[in-house]
Every structure is written in C-alpha cells, then in structure tokens.
Image (spheres, rainbow, N blue to C red):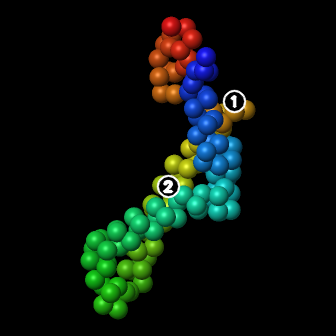
Amino acid sequence: MSEEMTWARAREARRERTGCPPWRGFSAACIIVLCGVTARTALPVALVVGTLLSAVNFNQGAVIAGGGGTPAVWLRVSFNYAVPFVVSSMGFLGAGRLRPGNASPVRRGPSSSVKGHSDTRRDR
C-alpha cells in the first residue's frame, strides 16, 4: 500500500524539486536572491516578460530601435525587467519559507484553516 500524500509531504517534495534552501525573514530572502540562487528560474521569466513589456509599453520599443533612448526610457526599461525578476524570485522562495515557530519549511495547505479539518486523509 502506498503512503498517502499529505500537504506537508507535497510541500517538502516541491522544495526538494526546486532546490530552494529553507529561510526565514526578509534579510535571509535577500541573501538567497543576491547570491543568485533564484536566478536559474527568475532570469528566463524576466527576459521574456521584460522584453515583451519593453516592446509594447509607452512605445519604448520604437524609441529604442530609433536610437532615441533617453535616461528616463532606460529607467522604465530596467523596471520592465526588474519587476518580473522579483515576482519570479518570490514564487521560487515560497517553497523554502520557514514559518514562525516551525523548524520545518513545510506549510499546511489552504484547507488546514477549516475547523475540524485535518491535512491528512487517515481520519476518513
């Protein structure tokens, strides 16, 4: 008989698959991002989304292609790449976040807040 999958086991399996180290607190998350741990997943997303945004936002693509890129245009373009990188990094970091009071990076699923509901199916 196979072992039932609980929210905790599913979360741990996801963390192992992504390679995100356990962390707690804003400074630890910043260190993980600055050390490049999230770059493998966040850079491709930032490149694709940032390029698309730059091509369509405020006619930036035409301005840059025409050689008229002012510092203000380049600042907007840098944000077009930075925002998707940060959002993708936050998604990556979600797998390893340690909750206050927990030694494990595993969270309970969304249904665990329902009164009387267990995160396993053994009680059925």
Q: Which circle marks residue 88 in the picture?
A: 2
Q: Which residue is mark 1?
A: 101
Compared with residue 118, is residue 29 higher up or lower down, i.e. above or below?
A: below
User: Which-is-in-front pick, marks 2 and 1?
Assistant: 2
**Left or right: where does residue 62 sit relative to residue 15?**
left
- Crowding near pointer 2: few (<14 within 10 Å), some, many (20+)? some
Q: Residue at x 61, y 45 (%)?
A: 17
Nearest the viewer among 73 and 62 is: 62
Work out which residue is located at the far right of the displayed protein and give it. Answer: 103
Q: Residue at x 65, y 42 (%)?
A: 16
Looking at the rendered structure, the kind of residue marked 2 is Ser
107 left or right of 60? right
Q: Nearer the viewer, residue 97 or 2?
A: 2
Residue 12, compared with residue 17, is above or below; it is above
From the image, which quarter does the N terminus lie in? top right
Q: Secondary structure at mark 1?
A: loop
**Residue 10 visible (yes or no):** yes
Q: Label 1 is placed on what type of residue?
A: Gly
Please identify the quarter of the rendering in which residue 96 is found.
top right
Q: CA distance from mark 2 to mark 1?
A: 26 Å
Residue 17 vs 58, above or below: the answer is above
Question: Which residue sits at x=47%, y=17%?
Answer: 114
Q: Which element carries disc 2, helix, strand or loop?
A: helix
* For the residues bearing labels 2 and 1, Cβ distance under 8 angstroms: no
Query: What is the x, y in percent for residue 38?
Result: 60, 57
